[in-house]
Amino acid sequence: MADYKLSASLNGHEDDIRAVCFPSSKAVISSSRDGTVRLWSLLSDNPPTYDGKITLNASGFVNAVTYLPATQQFPEGLVVSGGQDTVIEVRQPSKGPGENAEALLLGHSRNVCTLDVDQAGAFIVSGAWDGEARIWPVGKWESQTVLTGHEGSVWSVLAFDSETVITASADKLIRVFHTSGKLLRKIKGSDAPVRALCKLPKGHPSGAEFASACNEGIIRLWTISGIQVGELHGHESFIYSLAVTPSGEIVSSGEDRTLRIWKGNECIQTVTHPAISVWTVAVCAETGDIVSGASDRVVRVFTRSPEREANVETTRQFEESVKASSIPQEQVGEVNKENLPGPEFLVQKRGTKEGQVQMIKEHDGSVTAHTWSAGAAMWVNVGTVVASVGSSGKRVPHNGKEYDYVFDVDIEDGKPPLKLPYNLSQNPYEAATKFIEDNNLPISYLDQVANFITTNTQGATLGKPDSQGASDPWGSDNRYRPGETSHLPPTQPPKILPQRTYLSIQVARIPPIQKKIQELNQALIKDGHKELSLNPSDLTILASLCKHLESTDATKSSQTDAIELELAIKMTTTWPYKDRLPALDLLRLLAVSPKTAKYSSSGGNFIDVLASGAMEVQPPLDNNIMMAVRAFANLFESPEGRALAISEFDKIQDIISTSIRSSTNRNLLVAATTVYINYAVYFAAETDSTNFEHVLALIDTLGKIMDMQADSEVVYRALVAVGTLVTLDEEAKSAARDIYGIEKSISTAVGKASDPRIRNVSAEILGLLK
């Protein structure tokens, strides 16, 4: 049978996609932590293209979505969704977010995390963090039956047939209920929380009738009577979602970045995503196509039909984004570089099974991960292994391992605190769950522990540099932030304002940059543009520059010289505009050097070079201008750079405010708000030389960003910048409050955000404005 190939990538969500469903071959539905439900309608078949529209705007995360098939009363069918606000909404797909729902189902007291519908369309079943599952008859829209007895969150529900509902819980048990509410049996589903369920078709080769998955990374196959008839091993972390194809293959996804297809007891295909978590999968009953939702905010459709495959460029972008992903070292365990084979292994040795992982030591010393694709009979590059590091730069030992943080958590007075280890690369929920399991704590503590982790690592998140080429270099460390509860003593969030340290964006993968420049140079020569190309001497200078930038002392002024800077500027300003990104990337890294800040020529200073290189064509490419704005942020690393940034404030502000006015490029917006934080830090440190007009310009721009943008990291950085500005003096505070109405902008930001960092810093700013 053919492998699944990418069919479409659907972009639009602004946070993790937590649930998807595939109601027909013509539509996909998704829900997200951005508080929206979106309907993606198929516009054309070859290649598949979709039109996405928002059908629901909620006040918090939307964690679950399902579809009630068409009836005479509702010929479009009904979209059912639920999440953090505890309300289950039932609405027609064609209705917009401003129109009334068909029904609002009220009954759960905490986060709704799972939904399913009866195959006959008679009822909806839901599960939530309150430890209950509920059955809602269609048309009556009230909870007819409450399925109780769970000792933890109900993570998954399955409407098995018209009289049977199965639940999976954080208490490690699977329960089979009659729809009257009678408990028929308990099944020990795992030694860890059970996260997912799916019904298997009649005549499944294993004899199983349904499957479950858990935090152990194991899929188990069961009869309805509770007999386990099989286990599927292959996932390397939590499994979050299960589905089944019309031909009976199981589809699974989880925290190990993969979607996997299982035939019988064998994994026959592994699809790695450029994300940390693949939260959800669903299957189209008509075509067998698969849809996934992940932490990189992209909905993806996969197909076995050649006529529904994505075009070459969409497929290439997906493959490149997987290859460019950074894989936390904790995910792959200890890696001894000296014992790893080199790249020649990939052509000399075949894998032994689908999904087998092989680490390779590249010629530049980096470690890449490759998985074996049995269908393609080849190794697939799925990213580069990187070590994480906490804000202090030092790892903390605990139980024989090293972590970015080891927190002391007081659970009970009079008893010693418990140790909570955490790495920035981890999902806070995963770390919280393990902490609860290791210490035999109630599962009801889960959300508060996860929130504690998020709150107490926010400083590291703010200043954490990105990984060059990653699809989401700024948001993935803080993907999951459950709401607050009163089960634990509340943690007092640390004071954030004023921000006192400059932020830079310096981390990069130099070898790919150098390789891309060499490829572009060869293309120039081939196209007859030798006057623009690099000669052998230039290539030697390029190699020297890249070597300097790779060294640990790359920020020292002695590391680069004028001839290397001139070479980067030549490529930035004379090469074809579409080919300038890697050269701009080099200038972004060189911006930390005082020599760069002092650069001057007939073409102007360093700011003029960046403006010319990034904005020569109108409208400019988002990534080109983004790289220039990152360079502006990096100028603040040296006194000379700060002096240049202040003297050229008007020019920099004009470039940024113009470029972000209508942009949705997240990396550009984060870079811009980072520049504004750095200006605010400078103004707070150098109050005597601060130009008040510059302060007002920043407050005005930052208010507009809070009004217009919804991305949590962009809004958070804007808040930190404006909060630092209002600490300058009473005049700045008064202008922010009375002239620019910053309190209204803050209220707008809080209304759109579920990120506790935003709530905390907003409260701090509002306190300062009083």
Image: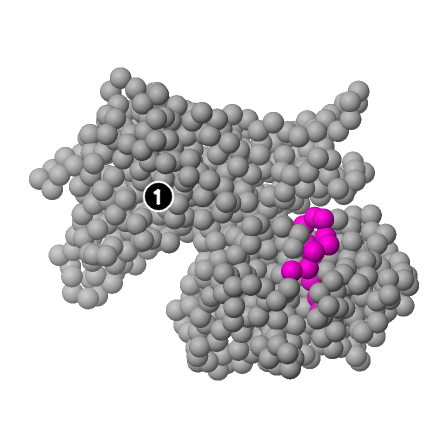
Q: Name the residue at 68% across, 33% down.
A: 420
Q: Quadrant of residue 579?
A: bottom left
For residue 171, side relative to residue 36 (left or right): right
> What's the magenta region?
104-117
Q: Name the residue at 63% across, 50% down.
A: 84
For residue 541, side relative to residue 717 (left or right): left
Q: Is residue 160 visible?
A: yes
Nearer to us in this view, 181 or 102: 102
Q: Quadrant of residue 406?
A: top right
Q: Name the residue at 61% across, 67% down.
A: 102
Q: Is residue 196 visible?
A: no
Q: Which residue is mark 1?
A: 704
Screen quadrant of the C terminus: top left
Farthest-out residue, top: 688
Nearer to us in this view, 285 or 392: 285
Query: Where residue 328 sits in the image (x, y, percent)?
Result: 56, 45
Neighbours of disc 1 within 10 Å: few (<14), some (14-19), many (20+): some
For residue 605, side relative to residue 725 (left or right): left
Query: Where residue 725 sits in the image (x, y, percent)?
Result: 36, 28
Judging from the image, the colouring scheme is: one colour
Nearer to us in this view, 709 or 366: 709
Q: Is residue 94 covered in magenta?
A: no
Nearer to us in this view, 499 or 302: 499
Query: Where residue 373 sits in the image (x, y, percent)?
Result: 58, 67
